[in-house]
Image (cartoon, helix red, strand yellow):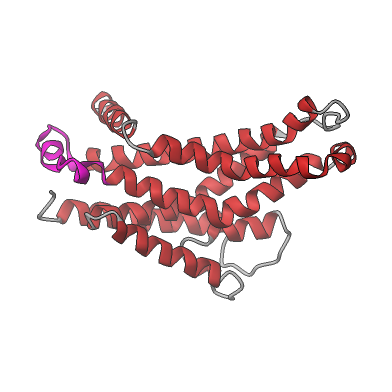
Amino acid sequence: MIGAFALSVSSEWLKQKRSLTFWLVTGSAFFVPAIIFLSRFRRIDALPAVYRADGFWERLWVQSWESMALMILPMAIMLTVTLITQIEDRNYAWKQVHASPQPLATIFTAKLVVILALVVEMILWFTAAIYLAGILPAVILPNVDAPPRAFPAARFLARDVDFLIDALPIVALQYLLALRFRTFLTPLGVGMAVWILSIGTISWTYNYVVPYSYAGLDYLMVEYKRPLMLPASPRAMAALYFVVFTIAGYGMYALRRDKG
């Protein structure tokens, strides 16, 4: 049973390698840190003082995650999920997949595991890119010393886990939409509408009802210390949404008569 599931996941992973997901994941991870790195050279004279500050890594982390939590991460997930789910639609391969000796639950879960692995990969690459954006100017420029404190990898990786959980509702709902609609633009358009709604309602009292808002809310509450009145932590509510959307997505997929 476990071996068959592992083979299914391996098959899904091989299929995604022929798509644009690698470039999407790496490009999304390095986009913001690359801009920050290049911006360092606009004011080279000020860099020595910037790098001597005790909270150097924390400020760089907050600066980098602002755009990532609110914009890049949701958009990258929407595109990644849609690309992965549309592989069979583009190649007219759903009939071959369903003709294989795999239960529907295995097919559904294997794709979901690959999507989650790609999201984890993107967040880890992003953390590595933050480190490179911070350390490379000290390596390149002779008058810039390395930050006085070491890169707090353990603390930042713990926050990576938080943001991963915050993003789970986006994964599950986009997966549901991509399985329901066989075109590329429809699930992406619906997802973008929900994402724009989450940005527009970020200051609303009941902003937590929008399932794509949790990464942004978590960022504001922890990094900016902004008090927000939520019924539970963003991660708890995101996990609940993920379970609901995943069950609904599988139910819709399993009960659908036309499976391609």
Q: Residue at x 67, y 32 (%)?
A: 132
* Magenta segment: 86-104
Q: Quadrant of residue 232?
A: bottom right
Q: Residue at x 62, y 33 (%)?
A: 128
The percent coordinates of residue 189 (x first, y second) are: 36, 62
**In this rendering, position of residue 70 left or right of residue 146:** left
The percent coordinates of residue 17 (x first, y second) are: 34, 31
* Above/below status of 63 relative to 107: below
Q: Quadrant of residue 207?
A: bottom right
Q: Residue at x 42, y 62 (%)?
A: 192
Near-viewer residue (101 or 177): 177
* Above/below status of 190 relative to 215: below
**Residue 158 visible in the picture:** yes
Check residue 192 for magenta coloring: no
**Residue 233 visible in the picture:** no
The percent coordinates of residue 229 (x first, y second) are: 63, 70
**In this rendering, position of residue 260 left or right of residue 88:** left
Check residue 88 for magenta coloring: yes
